[in-house]
Image (tube, grey):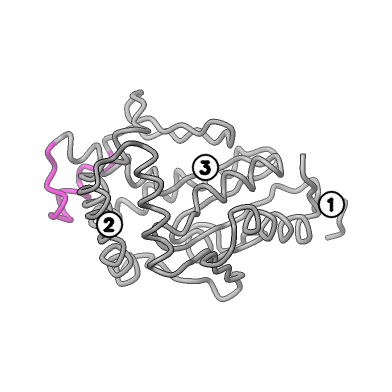
Amino acid sequence: MDTADRAHAPVVVAIDGPSGSGKSTVSRAVAARLGLSFLDTGAMYRAMTWWMLVNEVDVEDPEAVAVACGKPVIVSGTDADGPTITVDGQDVSGPIRGPEVTAKVSAVSAVPAVRSRLVDLQRGCAEVAERGIVAEGRDMGTVVFPQATVKVFLTASVEARAARRAAELRAKGVDEATITAMAADLARRDAADSSRETAPLAQAADAVLVDTSELTLEQVIDRIAGLVEERAGLSSV
């Protein structure tokens, strides 16, 4: 496929990595720069977890979660300038970021039925993205979009990720006790996401590793946007 053909083909940029690596911020910025749609798949798993908690489903019971996961209507808006996430028509972009959801999302995400349902929704979002999509999560390059145009595994040291997450939470006015607890939870989530049987967090064999520990946000965005421009024949908008 020559450059002209690639420029007209839908582009899929798969960005994976552990919690706190900056996937959402970087992915959204890359999508905006290149005029692509943006999909925060982590928000979809958080939305499912939020619904389970609100409806008093025992999230530690995989069978109960599997039975219930087909009930909520989860819709992920893919506009990079203002992504949205709703459950049964309700905007849940705020509630899904709370500590209760954060503590339980790994357990819900590990249930195969949940992943199967949300993977279908994620692929559906890509199918209707006219120019292409930047999708971020934990199994984008390995499971959801194995034929992605560009695959990136975004990571950083635990210390760097904890510091960034703490700064982000302080900016939102979160109390220090909660910040300390959520920062400490990074290692637990890393272990849970990497060791689950279904679609564990892993770097795809053909993914480009980008360690952001010593890089500025702008440097990371430049690096990934450059990769997409090179491989897909796209240019910034």
In three-dimensional space, the C-alpha distance between marks 2 and 1, rounded to whole angstroms, equals: 40 Å
Instruction: Give coordinates of residue 19: x percent, y percent.
Output: 39, 58
Instruction: Check disc 2 and report its element: helix, strand or loop.
Output: helix
Quadrant of image for the N terminus: bottom right
Q: Residue at x 30, y 72 (%)?
A: 195
Is residue 69 found inside the magenta-colored segment of the image? yes
Q: What label does residue 5 carry, if any?
A: 1
**What segment is highlighted magenta in the picture?**
56-70
- Look at mark 2 in the image and give the residue it sits on: 106
Quadrant of image for the C terminus: top right
- Mark with earlier residue (2, 1): 1
The kind of residue tagged 3 is: Gly
- Look at mark 3 in the image and give the residue it sits on: 124
Q: What label does residue 26 carry, if any?
A: none
Instruction: Give coordinates of residue 80: x percent, y percent.
Output: 58, 37
The kind of residue tagged 1 is: Asp
Q: Residue at x 45, y 36 (%)?
A: 76
